[in-house]
Amino acid sequence: MPILHVSIAAGRSDEMVENFIREVIKTTSATLNAPESAVTVIVNQIPHTHLAVAGKLKSES
């Protein structure tokens, strides 16, 4: 059973996150030749204040 943990920046709508999860399930299923019902996706939404890119906090952007 594939289990995927994904972290994304917080602030996206529930609909957008749900669509993302559906696409991840479809792609994982097709790539690994596993039934969609066997794919588990766990999404963590991280506040911008807890993200840094290239040494700079996203909250400072």
Image (cartoon, helix red, strand yellow):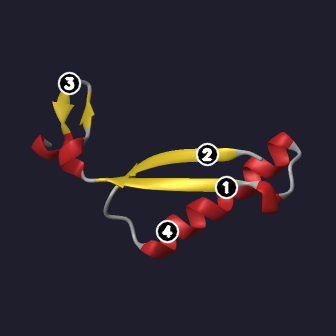
Indicate which label's residue lies in the foreground, 4 or 2. Answer: 2
Residue type indicated by callout 4: Met
> Would you call the spot at circle 3 few (<14 residues within 10 Å), some (14-19), or many (20 or more)?
few
Dot 2 corresponds to which residue? 4
Q: Determine the secondary structure under disc 4.
A: helix
Q: Is residue 41 above or below residue 56?
A: below
Mark 4 or mark 1: which comes first in sequence? 4
Mark 3 or mark 4: which comes first in sequence? 4
> Would you call the spot at circle 2 few (<14 residues within 10 Å), some (14-19), or many (20 or more)?
few
Mark 3 or mark 2: which comes first in sequence? 2
CB within 8 Å, label 4 to label 1: no
Mark 4 or mark 2: which comes first in sequence? 2
Residue lying farthest to the top in this orientation: 55
Residue 53 shows which numbered tag?
A: none
Dot 3 corresponds to which residue? 55
Dot 1 corresponds to which residue? 40
Query: Could you give the CA–CA distance between mark 3 and mark 4, rounded to whole angstroms?
Result: 28 Å
Mark 3 or mark 1: which comes first in sequence? 1
Residue type indicated by callout 3: Gly
CB within 8 Å, label 3 to label 1: no
Q: Is residue 4 above or below residue 54?
A: below
Percent coordinates x, y for residue 30 in the rendering:
84, 48
Q: Determine the secondary structure under disc 1.
A: strand
